[in-house]
Amino acid sequence: MPVTTLLDREIHVDDEGFLTVYDEWDEALGAELANQIGIEMTDEHWSLIRFLREDFKEKGETATTRRVQAVGGVPTKRQFELFPKKPAKKMAYIAGLPKPHGCV
Amino acid sequence: MRRLLVLGAGTAGTMAVNKLRPRLPESEWEITIVEQSATHYYQPGYLFLPFGIYQPKQIVKPTAHFIPKGVTLVTGEIDVVKPEDNTVVLADGTALEYDYLVIATGTTPRPEETPGMAGDEWRKSVHEFYSFDGAMALTEKLKSWDSGRLVIHVTEMPIKCPVAPLEFTFLADSFFKKKGVRDKVEITYVTPLPGAFTKPVSAKALGGMLEDRGIALESDFLIERVDTEKKAIVSFDEREIPFDLLVTIPLNMGADYVSKSGLGDELNYVPVDRETFLSKAHDNIFAVGDASDIPTSKAGSVAHFAMDLFPENFVRYVDGKAMTEKFDGHANCFIESGAGRGMLLDFNYETEPLTGTFPYPVVGPMRLLKETRLNHFSKLAFRWVYWHVLLRGRHLPISSHMSMAGKVPAQDS
């Protein structure tokens, strides 16, 4: 498993740079990850990221855009506005969670 | 008397009662199965109907035909499960009590969940083949439709039989070639996934097969609505793909009573332990087949492999013993690639589909991830196996656990 250094910390990531250890993440790191993919974080962005973190803790899986809409209460259209093009992937990346399951 | 109640007599539910009846003494156990449809459909056959490869009568049989002696079949619609009372209530008010409940009501296409999809153009220029009626309507359409833009589209994963839309695409290519009009039909395959399939190795192989056939691939497309005036599908990131004939796989969801009963996730699938299918919320409820949320394909092959383990586990569990059989997510699928050829995929929770051979008894070995005639004929032969062996719970000599024998680890990237 590759290790990378972010904010002077050693972070475990997968081949695409998604964090693999839940507890290595904090909001400072989230801000850095957002910066890397060109997302300017607002309160609205953060509330979504916090939802994803909490939901993952409970379910053990990264929420899909549908789940973020159904359970998190943010319409898919809005998710696309906040995290353009690939919201599910970008939200997971910033939240330090695995990419949502390439559902089979 | 202890009471086992099974909801749904599709592939998983029917196999469950056939395998459990001999294992649970009739003097101790009552088994009841509830199903709303008097007809059992061989669902893999839907793919072949529109191209005239199968006739409707080959894929329908009476539900009752497959329910063994000693099991009570109740025909009716399920209204709600009341887990706190261990009771299921049917739409006509009948209440059925249980000691153990097995949910096997599968998943169905829901075109009404996407704006415009089930609107004015439904079954005119917008079609689906995930239901018997839908496949029949598309059969009629393809009798006369022979030029223009054909768009094959997947709304959202997970869907039942995830390779079926690709197979439909390959068969359509073949169908129009045979008719001599392939040059008048433009085919586009549209998917919410980053590539042609969910698993990277097969996505690569299958993507290449689209390219070879002159089929355009539009990936990462999450549909927002069908614009019936413009006749186009529109994505959340505002891409528009025009069509003359849209063949879509609508959003797939579990049964509505599941969510009404508080048993489902956002797509009405029942959260279960992925190795044993025991509900995470109730210790006397299981969910099997497509109705559960296990992260593998929603497919008959998965139901079949799961049903090799579940009966043993169930018998142990109701005796107060630990469930020792662990499901690994094993799935395999024959993929029709058109012109009388097919290929075979084999994978599980952890392992990608691999190349090499699959050690099928008698007819095998089969080539994996390669197009061959033998794979095609095996797919057609499977219909017989389904009706005569599988549903009746007879043993098919294929291991439920995935084996690495004969396989060549694939180069992923």
Image (tube, coloured by chain):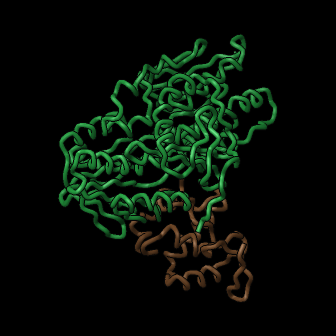
Chain colours: A brown, B green
Query: Does residue A101 sit above or below B357 in this rendering?
Result: below
- Residue A22 horizontal/vertical position (percent): 70, 69
* Quarter of the view holding residue A36: bottom right
Which residue: 38% across, 60% down? Answer: B212
Nearer-the-camera pick, B180 or A63: B180
Place of residue B64 in the rendered image (x, y in percent of width and height, measured from the top left): 48, 17
Which quadrant holds residue B129? top left
- Which residue, as the protein is rendered here, is positioned at the far right? B321
Q: Is residue B409 above or below residue A47?
A: above
* Of residues B346 and B118, the one drawn nearer to the viewer in this rendering: B346
How many labels sit on residues? 0
Return the residue nearer the eye: A47 or B223: B223
In the picture, measured across the screen, residue B8 lies left or right of residue B233, that is right
Q: Is residue B120 visible?
A: no
Q: Residue at x 62, y 23 (%)?
A: B394
For the question of whether residue B272 can be seen, the reply is yes
Instruction: Give the percent coordinates (x, y) of residue B400.
Output: 67, 38
B94 or B64, which lies in front? B64
Q: Quadrant of the N terminus of chain A?
A: bottom right
Residue B50, quarter of picture? top left
Residue at the bottom extreme of this rendering: A8
The answer to whether residue B201 is above or below residue A1 is above
Q: Residue at x 64, y 16 (%)?
A: B30
Residue B154 horizontal/vertical position (percent): 39, 54
Who's the residue at 62% across and 47% down the image? B357
Would residue A15 appear left or right of B116 to someone viewing this image?
Answer: right
